[in-house]
Amino acid sequence: MELVYALVIGALTASGVYLLLRARTFPVVVGLTLCLMG
Amino acid sequence: MSLPLVVFLPFLGAIAAPLFALGGRTAIAIASSVPALIALAALFPHWETLANGGTVLQSWEWLPAIGISFSFRLDGLSLLFALLILIIGVLIILYARYYLKPAENIGKFYALLLCFKGSMLGIVLSSNLLLMMIFWELTSLTSFLLISFWNHKQDARRGARMALAVTGGGGLALLAGILIIGNIVGSFELDDVLAAGDVIKAHAMYPVALTLVLLGAFTKSAQFPFHFWLPHAMQAPTPVSAYLHSATMVKAGIFLMARLYPALAGTEQWFYMVSFTGMATLLIGAYVAMFKHDLKGLLAHSTVSHLGLITLLFGMGTELAAVAAVFHVINHATFKASLFMAAGIIDHETGTRDMRRINGLWRYMPHTATLAMVAASSMAGVPLLNGFLSKEMFFAESLQLNLPGIWAWLPPIVATLAGIFAVAYSARFIHDVFFNGKPVNLPIYPPHEPPRYMKIPVEILVFACIMVGMFPAVSVGPLLYAAAHATLGGEVPDYQLAVIHGFNLPLIMSFAAFFGGLIMYSQRQKFFDFHARFKEIDEKAVFEAIVLRIVDLANGFTARIENGSLQRYGMLLVVSVLAVAAMPLLDLGIFIGETGLSPVDWPTAIAAGVLIICALLTAAVHRQRFYALVVLSVVGLIVALAFARFSAPDLAMTQLSVEVVTIVLLMLALYYMPGWTPVETPLKRRFRDIAIAGIAGIGMTLVTLAMLTQPFSSISDFFLENSKPGGGGTNVVNVILVDFRGFDTLGEITVLAIAALGIYALLKNTPLTPPPSDGEGHAWSRDAYPIMLRLIARPLLPLSLMVSAFIFLRGHNLPGGGFIAGLITSIALILQYIASGMNWTQDRIPFKYHNVIGLGLLFATIAGAASLAFGYPFLTSTFGYITWPVVGKFEVASALVFDLGVYLTVIGATLLALVTIGRISPHSAIKSKREGA
């Protein structure tokens, strides 16, 4: 269970950080949302 | 009390003196002299103690934790300097009264002069090294302001900047040096430091400390290679040059060496650093002085040279040399200050300082000429004048140095050579200015004697030169003894103050210097021709170029890091977070903890799988913004479910409602924006970003895993225990929000309100035309407000309002509360906007969302402040039970009012933001008007 939980957080963070590093505002906002959920 | 009085009176005078400026120049000059006269009177009673080598200490505690105390110390050395500062200061005030033109801002001038005087007295009277450091920097600052007194002149501004940069930079070095010394000794008090001389010299940090302290002293006292600022400081009005840049401030570095002599001197490093620096300065200053056509330029370089001489004497390390150094401080101050004043008079009366034009002034101003000639002779070292005595002592000491082999010849040769130059430039000062034909093309012609009182300060100083020169033992003997005693920190060697010590080697050196100098002056044309072959360096230009270069470098460096790309800043931020987090985590060792893993059930695993896929998909399809949003909403939904699954109903409800609001907000924004993101970053950079994101994700996974599998107790136990007895509610999350961490919540809702108002303010007058299609060729749906949605949405409103009221009221004990209830209400209203259009809905809402926000904040603050009325701290909550018919026993907590504030603020902020974004398009307003009608 802990592993699943950790993987979920990892996936959310990774996707969020990738989008955070984009050049446009929209993906950055989406990325922030993902990071927050992570 | 008398010592701080001496230091601070000038500062008080600086405030008071300008008030007298209206009364005329004489009034302000008299007012400015008062602090010095009182100070002299205050110092007089201490003479008895000091004459026998005693010290006076007066100290108060200031910041004991960092070693600063308000302590002052008067001994022979500080008395000598204080007298120079005070007496020459009064003479300068008198002189400046005639020097400055009526149109000039005399109030500012005297105020600055008094500030300087106070700072300089602070340096010499401080007993605490850190306190002294403060005054040290103050003299740099006041010197800067005084050099740039004529701030309309570019040269003055440049000279001032240069002086500040050099002396200020040296000040930093000195501060570092003092801190090291304080660290070694364990105290910044002068008595402790002087007593710990052997400890300091034996310490491993001694070379560093000495170098830093000497850097401070050398920059301040214009020693080679930092001497270049002093000649350029001559852009200051002449009283300033006479006072700061020959008599007092430039001697601060010398004073420092004398002050710390028992603590730092006597080592090889001291000997080599100080004596060779002094020797170089002595020679270079004297050589360059000869070629200066500017009267003040000549005197400035001569000052540099004499400062070098004093430094060299301190560097020699013998006790007699130290006595000679102290003696020369007095002598140089008297003859050089009077020479500067004479130069100022000549400048004042002829309008120029160029010695090629000023000639034959003897005929026009014989009185001034006599005074200047006596002072210049003293500078040259002519017998029966004070300059001769200390120079003889210097020559004698230069013969005593125990340098190996042929090096033993160096000091006497340098001394004689510098003596020759000194005689040559003194001869030039006398002959070129007062004789040597007729004046050439003077701006003011014919020159005549200055006002009577302008000469009095010069007369007094020249009289002192003669008195000391002829009757040294009577006139200056006791003071010199006291000062030497204090400098050496004990025994004073036998020395004799006599006019002539008999026919010996130093006397021969004096004669050689005298006649050599005269011969050199008579052959000056050859030297001038020789010197003209070298290109003259303008230090100011070099300095400015260096400063410019450094500024350019700094700008370039900044531009490289801060290139304006937000994307890049984001990357740097993320990378730094990773780096900062990685270091302690790597040390800690990330592993699966001792509690191990628990088994997983299938539904959870499947949901987690979907979530992970959707999260990665969001990133993968982010170019198609609409799809990304759809996938994102799936992620949000599953996260909400996850909260419910892991027993966090409050969070689940919040997440669910926040998710709805977020998606609606993003959809609204997407209406005005392109539906896709173009490819802009090169492939390489995208791989780099993927790598960064991957590291962040893996890092988070490992940290989470490690944290979840450790047995740990957190603060949550406290909350669980105290929620009911302390906050009156069983819903811990809500009690935390409104009670335990109520102040946090108040701050958060304030931020929320500010954000909403910010969105409103930004978009208020921004008309945006929405694109005619979605950008991919599809026209917008004609059916803007589908009838089905409309019909379902309207009856839903009262129902959902009821739900939110229920959630709100039960919040203290069961999942819910103001925050969630606010979001639910917001969503219910948003649904109306979506279903029936902006204007239709807005017409039916009888209040402005701004007011709702305001009301919410008011409720929350009042609920918090109410406890103040009962004498409890801000935001203390209370609760009680009342029995309500039908419902039964009912709990009422004062936190409910606070929660109401949260509720209202959330509604106001959410809707204000959304409605503002929804309304920015004029098109939609018209359209919805038609639809609504």
Image: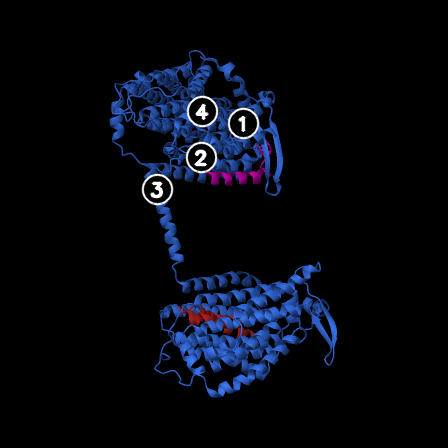
Chain colours: A red, B blue
Q: Quadrant of residue B96?
A: top left
- The range drawn in magenta is B170-193
Q: Earlier in the sequence, mark 1 or mark 4?
A: 1
Quadrant for residue B156, please give it.
top left
* Tag 4 residue: B94
B299, B31: nearer the viewer:
B31
Per the image, the residue denoted by label 3 is: B544
Kind of residue sitting beneath label 1: Ser
Residue B185 lies in magenta, yes or no? yes
- Mark 3 and 4 residues: CB-CB less than 8 Å, in contact? no
Q: Farthest residue toward the top?
A: B502
Residue at numbered disc 2: B108
- Tell me the kind of residue under disc 4: Leu
Q: Chain of mark 3?
A: B
Q: Give the chain of mark 1.
A: B
| Screen quadrant of the N terminus of chain B | top right
Type of secondary structure dominating the magenta stretch: helix
Residue depicted at 45% across the width and 33% down the height: B107
Q: Earlier in the sequence, mark 4 or mark 2?
A: 4
Label 4: which secondary element: helix
Q: Residues within 10 Å of mark 2 (few under 14, many from 20)?
A: some
Q: Residues within 10 Å of mark 4 (few under 14, many from 20)?
A: many
Whether label 1 touches label 3, CB < 8 Å: no
Would you name the residue on which mark 1 appears? B78
Within the image, what quadrant is residue B69 found in?
Answer: top right
Q: Going from the N terminus, do you reach mark 1 or mark 3 first?
A: 1
- Looking at the rendered image, the disc whose residue lies closer to the viewer, 3 or 4, is 4
Mark pair 3, 4: CA separation: 36 Å
Chain at numbered mark 4: B
Q: Earlier in the sequence, mark 3 or mark 4?
A: 4
Dot 3 or dot 2: first in sequence order is: 2
Left or right, residue B468 beside residue B372:
right
